[in-house]
Amino acid sequence: MKKYFYSIGLMSGTSIDGIDLSLIKSDGEKNIEVIDNIYQKYNNKFRQKIKKNIDLCYSKYQFTKFSKEIKAVEKDITIRHAKLCNLVKNKNKNIKIDLIGFHGQTMLHNPKKGYSIQIGDSKLLSKLTKTTVVSNFRNNDILNGGQGAPLAPLYHNLILSNILKIIPSAIINIGGIANITYIEKKNKIISFDTGPGNCLLDSWVKNKSKVFFDKNGNFAKKGKLNKRILDNFFKDPYYTKKPPKSLDVKKFNLKYLENSNLEDGCATLSALTIKSINTAVRSLKKPPKIILFTGGGRNNKFIINKLKTLINKPIYLIDKFNFNGDFIESQAFAYLAIRSYLKKVITLPSTTGVRKPCSGGIITKY
């Protein structure tokens, strides 16, 4: 008889805008029921505090050097995650929650040098929530030769196999970094980061205006693409590197755009996201028959409409299939927490480059 778990997944992504929480019921295999999704926004002061600490760290040495400041932020992040978990537990009192999948906040991602560092105190979270916590999902993969990212492909595969059953098909997540999960055939999953998603675009808008993002791509629509700047971005060898591959948000910056205005910068950075996704799709062995988009960037109509024209295949927001596209990553970590607890595989050679299918995650009991 299958055992089902109630699991919370937590995600605080590279956009540093807040915490996504999802509560699911699953066996860690083919069955999934999404019970609740909640988002808690960080106030701007706290957001800037996290960003300042991330910006200080470009190496393990700096991470150690600023460990005192980082520990203080880590405690604050953990307490905020715990409060949100307890809020959901109180809201769903009829459910006994078995696990919490705690991704934490990424500070550094450098698999080439053998590390990916997320902050978040799993012992404190477990103690404050009185729940078993699964964390540190990336480390075992990296120790076994993988990139440690992307981590959502097995969950993406579950969604595609449950709602579409169309092969080949793909899910593209546009978060801070954009990534693709491509189901080439049954049990053949390919995944990799395609390039910047929202990270550069959001930073540009924040620097140049009083808003936090380019709503619907309205700034980009008014702007003029600078092809020279776009070509400079695309000189990066990452784009010609074969997958599996992954990115840190620190890989790219805004130096090429110094003399651009708000709208032209948005047009050029949107084109970077569009071109990198289109390039990734065209690199696949067979074009996907259908593509679903998730993540905050799916709401940028300018980007999505351009991709629809370029790719010329059926493209939908995942929301059309009763999955909230803002919470796919947090649902994925709830699902991976169950798989980790059961010592099941969470990464594959074709998704992260790990030498063999790999389990992961560290279990912390209060």
Image (tube, rainbow, N blue to C red):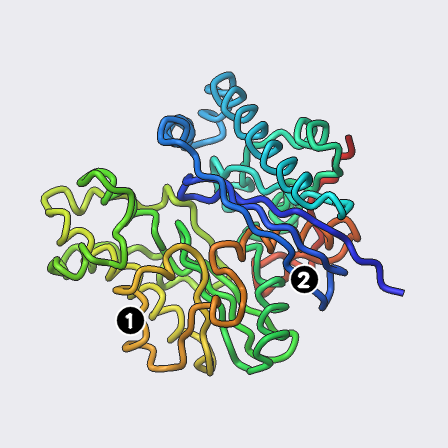
Q: Earlier in the sequence, mark 2 or mark 1?
A: 2
- Badge 2 marks a residue whose secondary structure is strand
Above-or-below relation of 74 to 204: above
**Relative depth, front residue between 177 and 37:** 37
Looking at the rendered structure, the kind of residue marked 2 is: Glu
Residue 13 horizontal/vertical position (percent): 47, 44
Above-or-below relation of 353 to 9: below
Q: Is residue 44 left or right of residue 70?
A: left
> Residue extending furthest top?
68
Residue 225 horizontal/vertical position (percent): 14, 60
Task: Please name the residue shown 50% across and 24% down the image.
Answer: 73
Task: Please name the residue shown 54% across and 36% down the image.
Answer: 118
**Relative depth, front residue between 247 and 143:** 247
CA separation in Å, label 2 and label 1: 31 Å
Q: Is residue 312 left or right of residue 167?
A: left
Q: Is residue 160 left or right of residue 26?
A: left
Please name which of the two marks, 2 or 1, marks the residue nearer to the observer.
Answer: 2
Above-or-below relation of 306 to 18: below
**What's the mark number on residue 33?**
2
> Residue extending furthest right?
1
Task: Please name the residue shown 40% across and 54% down the image.
Answer: 296
- Badge 1 marks a residue whose secondary structure is helix
**What's the mark number on residue 305?**
1
Q: Residues within 10 Å of mark 2 (few under 14, many from 20)?
A: few
Residue 80 horizontal/vertical position (percent): 55, 31
Q: Residues within 10 Å of mark 1 (few under 14, many from 20)?
A: few
Q: Is residue 151 left or right of residue 314?
A: right
Residues under numbered marks 2 and 1 in contact, where contact means CB atoms less than 8 Å apart: no
Which quadrant: the C terminus? top right
Task: Please name the residue shown 52% across and 80% down the image.
Answer: 168
